[in-house]
Image (cartoon, coloured by chain):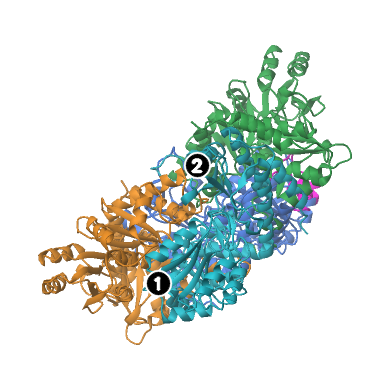
Chain colours: A blue, B orange, C cyan, D green
Amino acid sequence: MSGHRPVPPSAAKGRHFLQIPGPTNVPDRVLRAMAKPVIDHRGPEFAELGRSVLERLKPIFRTKGHVLVFSGSGTSAWEAALVNTLAPSDRVLMVETGQFAVLWREMATRFGLEIDSIPTDWRRGVDPNAVEQRLKQDTRHTIKAVCVVHNETSTGAASRIGLIRKAMDAAKHPALLLIDAVSSLGSIDVRHDEWGVDVSVSCSQKGLMLPPGIGLNAVSEKALAVSKAGGSRRSFLDWQPMLKANADGFFATTPATNLLYALEEALAMFEEEGIDNVYARHDRLAEATRRAVAAWGLENLCLESKDYSSVLTAVLMPDGHNADAFRKLILDRFNMSLGMGLGKITGKVFRIGHIGEMNDLTLAGTLAGIEMGLDIAGIPHQRGGVDAALRYLAETSRPSD
Amino acid sequence: MSGHRPVPPSAAKGRHFLQIPGPTNVPDRVLRAMAKPVIDHRGPEFAELGRSVLERLKPIFRTKGHVLVFSGSGTSAWEAALVNTLAPSDRVLMVETGQFAVLWREMATRFGLEIDSIPTDWRRGVDPNAVEQRLKQDTRHTIKAVCVVHNETSTGAASRIGLIRKAMDAAKHPALLLIDAVSSLGSIDVRHDEWGVDVSVSCSQKGLMLPPGIGLNAVSEKALAVSKAGGSRRSFLDWQPMLKANADGFFATTPATNLLYALEEALAMFEEEGIDNVYARHDRLAEATRRAVAAWGLENLCLESKDYSSVLTAVLMPDGHNADAFRKLILDRFNMSLGMGLGKITGKVFRIGHIGEMNDLTLAGTLAGIEMGLDIAGIPHQRGGVDAALRYLAETSRPSD
Amino acid sequence: MSGHRPVPPSAAKGRHFLQIPGPTNVPDRVLRAMAKPVIDHRGPEFAELGRSVLERLKPIFRTKGHVLVFSGSGTSAWEAALVNTLAPSDRVLMVETGQFAVLWREMATRFGLEIDSIPTDWRRGVDPNAVEQRLKQDTRHTIKAVCVVHNETSTGAASRIGLIRKAMDAAKHPALLLIDAVSSLGSIDVRHDEWGVDVSVSCSQKGLMLPPGIGLNAVSEKALAVSKAGGSRRSFLDWQPMLKANADGFFATTPATNLLYALEEALAMFEEEGIDNVYARHDRLAEATRRAVAAWGLENLCLESKDYSSVLTAVLMPDGHNADAFRKLILDRFNMSLGMGLGKITGKVFRIGHIGEMNDLTLAGTLAGIEMGLDIAGIPHQRGGVDAALRYLAETSRPSD
Amino acid sequence: MSGHRPVPPSAAKGRHFLQIPGPTNVPDRVLRAMAKPVIDHRGPEFAELGRSVLERLKPIFRTKGHVLVFSGSGTSAWEAALVNTLAPSDRVLMVETGQFAVLWREMATRFGLEIDSIPTDWRRGVDPNAVEQRLKQDTRHTIKAVCVVHNETSTGAASRIGLIRKAMDAAKHPALLLIDAVSSLGSIDVRHDEWGVDVSVSCSQKGLMLPPGIGLNAVSEKALAVSKAGGSRRSFLDWQPMLKANADGFFATTPATNLLYALEEALAMFEEEGIDNVYARHDRLAEATRRAVAAWGLENLCLESKDYSSVLTAVLMPDGHNADAFRKLILDRFNMSLGMGLGKITGKVFRIGHIGEMNDLTLAGTLAGIEMGLDIAGIPHQRGGVDAALRYLAETSRPSD
């Protein structure tokens, strides 16, 4: 629509396959909802919208507590979690599961937190035993928070937060539990209350199937109490004025109204499908993807099945082949975006997102693009990945009721 | 959006694959263009729109003559062709290539025309020799028009209009040549001027990638002259007042403005891709589809390669299996619509549309849905259809320049 | 969005006021509904849509009978009414209330009907007595139909169809009653069943607040019976195959699916507001408009209050001033489209549409544009038109419940 | 679209008039642009989008320097300005021009800044002399920044930033100059470079005519240098990683892609109209509004014409009348939102926004709604406000070239 930029090269290429692990493909009905005219953010119609989305977000986190919605990205939601609950010099325990864990740690460092870091090989989830050991060593309870990434979007390994909670309980440690649920929320089960999570951090553009622009915090009473008494200097991301305004359906600062329209529509879609059905769909698409990867003879970055992520699958490139060159070829030939390797695995993996508005046929198209790309790029592999996925999908397909 | 109907069952099923041979998948940018506010159909802004679309449609028909745009369906465009050029009792030669040829013939009968019909087995295009023979027999030139379907959407067989023109010339017969270019326009090459076509009939929802609601006629000077002197009683579909209004960019009756917005956007997409590239894309997707069908061991309704259609492929069901039950299963399981068998082949074939907004990955998804459906339905077939298609697509894939 | 046309001059001019008496301003929620992806017109989801709109249109016509929806304009719906019920040489009685009556008569002539025409001065509705007299003279009942325009969009005079029915009954004449409800449907009360109308003709872009592209017929059992037995040669607009397909929610030819989406949304809006409230709103806006016209010292083309139209007001220009120059100035200065004078009153009147998505403030803007235009153009008038309208609107304003 | 909320009461009320001073009415073409599918924020198509908007924003700020775009509200952009340039205990000079100045000061306090505050009566802009005096007293240059609100959205008084720069220069004071250009950007002239502004803070939902969700900073080289060396703890809002990513058209964290689509479209509209024409349009609409207010005999909160804002007009309610009750009546009767009084003038003023997608007729509708509201509410006033505005608009109307 702009007179200044040339037509994007994809104009003649048909529908784009956005198979990065977020932003995900946004349903067209969500896009249309977002195109509604802006309304007065202090008027009665807005109050209904605000109350609707704030209330209906709770089941997605499986919480009866508070969910806060900020204009911002997932990064801002990370920051909100830290600055509301932790003060400079506070000690936190983090587990380096991958690049997003690294980035969150860097953020914590910037806010003056002291980090105890548990390393990993970036090919697995958090080891609850390791957490338990560290916490037990912290007999004086100087660790104020445990920060873990629920689904590590850079590696395709998920951590079992329930076991981490058990580890914390076993260590009888009072630290807060903060989780990055950025790519897990709406994708795989997040049980904020049951798992005793204090802050779940998420955002709009992953499992919620929205455009980016909204950051989310689900917050426990314990975290709220900590926040009232302390935390870091903050203003825009402060929970207190936001919660006060939210009580009437309003926001402390001008909200991103049109993204709230989109959110309301996406929440309606979750309610229509049923959240357990959403998760089952993602699980099934993920398993089909892994079968394709195995059939190609390629290696899943995530080593053990207990850590497999239903959000994305990161695939290791055979030696001597660059993942980014491969991704570029796929984009050029098949109008599909795959996720790049991040941080220390740049160029070594590509990531396949399989959440959001996905069904059997869009997954089939996705895997077909990869299989053809492997062929064209001359990357050593066996054929039959798509076929293996289709067999699994056909076997597990069920009629609608 | 309506409060009265339940949420459609496909709400939880991800993106719909609309793989009937029209209406085809409409690009989202076309849908957004269609959502622009209505303007005064007698004002200067409209005149620019009208001139733009009327002029830019011509290259799609490969004509320098007139293209007329009516509010209506392809059926109304058929009717416009007949009532503007033929009077009751006029004799026309038609070839029964399939159900759409049958329907056009029925329409002609309703307008009192006398029909000479050449039968076929519904598995091939028009035989130019047969046309030539009939015309040669008509030494008194009582046949006023030859009406043929360019691409028979019910069977997936295309006719070679250039050879039919040669046959008419060889017979030295002055009949008008009217073609149904409903599913061919924008899908495969239509050469209105070069082939000496007098009326090319088409509409919006096939190769043009628009929603239904617009009927089209491209008209030769010869047809125009006939129209001025005669034809049948008519009003809404009369060419003369329409052409008069079109001269200034306006329409004789209130036009479907928003579909013209959509048309303008679709024409821009044709210009960006290049019409020959559009056709080459359709040819390639069609060949991949046929390879899948062959690999499955299923039979293409269209018997000979010279008649193969790049618009759609009609697939014969093995004996004892009903195509509509199969289509229903595919819709239920995979949220994909396939074309039904029409007329005398109801239940015996399903049709795969492969035009419009299609690329390699959406075709892969389409074929994957069929292959899984064959498996689930227990229809005798060999695996490997998708694989055969992917091999062909990969082999013939080229980098964008 | 097209790369070929310059940005329309109104790009920098803010929201357009489309105050022609149709197409009317389309609510943005209707435009968004129209932008939904196309679905299979032979599938189960479509059947629900089809049934929904066909059923929910009936209360708008206040009929329990059939409503038919065609792809086409209002002109095609006029034609459908004529060709389904009348045969060449049939005699019909028409009343020339204005330009649309003239055009409908011309259409009737083209289909070979013989017309008895009652003239008027184009400043009033149909005189029921005149109809009664003519019918009484037709003792042999050679007149097969009475065709009248309910709301004459060219003059702003409405006819009282109930009185015309009484006149026909008083004359004990069996002719069919066909009415043009093009601009009255959804704008002012149309009582198809109560008034004994046989065919009510309408379309999408007036009171229904849709883009153009749909023609409508509401049809009595009597008209249906006549249609089965006779009528003119026809195909696309034939009622019988359409009604047969409609029984299952489908259409005889490919329907304009996206306009049906829009229709469904507009029908939801009618149901939300309540049709009587819609009419009351239009009546009030029309009265405010007339008060403005009177305050300006200008003359309403419609002479008597019993004929006043709540759809539009046609205003006579003072001698020596051309309405089209005035309209052009208004469009240029204020980005508002007013209706032109049609036929023999071209240049002599401008028409103000006040139906569709209109409220007090958009009417105020409309009248303000006219008052400023009168001032700038130097057209003799008194100030105070807007003020008179605002006083009336304020006096009659009521809180929402 | 949601199944859970009742239809908003405005559904039957026609087009909403969003006449708060932001969010403003968003052009429908901007809303449609925002509905485009999300793309990979790390891909080549995004890079073009990113470069386009970052470059084309510069002329709106009249800067050759850097403009930063954050996901967030205007509040986050305030925060970015503070935390990038100032450290806890730094002293800043602020002028309390109204509620937004108060809120910015509160934010500064939360970040540990020490505030020198110059009070006002909330009815005028910043007094450059007062700034000069304070700075001259600060002989040791302990004041690190002067923070002023360019256009005080709570009062409708604009400050002359050029004069403040002169005052700072006259005082030979090295403090940074930070301005809140939230409602001025794109509304009235902002001359970032010429006025020597170090940080201009703005956002999307005011003069830029976008939905909320984007915060903006334009930054001088001096501010950048300060930022590199110091500032407060920060992460999400840190300029450095953002500028580094921006160099290639990307963003440091996932950007609000769809709001960038909207931004690109809005920038195209600015380029089409010409930014000086935009400002002239706003000036003219503002003057018309003030004439209406004066004719009603009501009082503009802003006392002196040198401070008049072309963005909004705040109107004092006569004693004994509550502005919020009046606003509620207007919303209920006329579907128009007016701005509420904020902070210490709550209930005492209502604010009329006259920027964004506004033209003569939408302003006329706006003023008509207020005049009718005054009448219905029984608020003492003289009639004739709309009339005075229309006279002025007609007198100053010019044909388009």
Q: Residue at x 71, y 22 (%)?
A: D306
Q: Is C146 situated left or right of C238 in this image?
A: right
Residue C354, numbered circle:
none
Horizontally, residue B374 falls left or right of residue D255, namely left
- What label sits on residue B338 in the rendered view? 1
Is A167 drawn above or below residue C344 in the view shown?
below
Mark drawn on residue C324 = 2
Going 88% across and 37% down the picture, which residue do you hit? D319
Vertical order, C186 against D114 (above or below): below
Q: Nearer the viewer, residue A223 or C348?
A: C348
Range of magenta residues: A225-254
Does the magenta segment cover residue C86? no
Residue B16 lies left or right of residue D167; in this view the side is left
Residue C251: x and y in percent read: 45, 73
- Foreground label between 1 and 2: 2
Residue C349 or residue A216, whichever sits in front? C349
Q: Nearer the viewer, residue B112 or A88?
A: B112
Q: Magenta span has A233?
A: yes
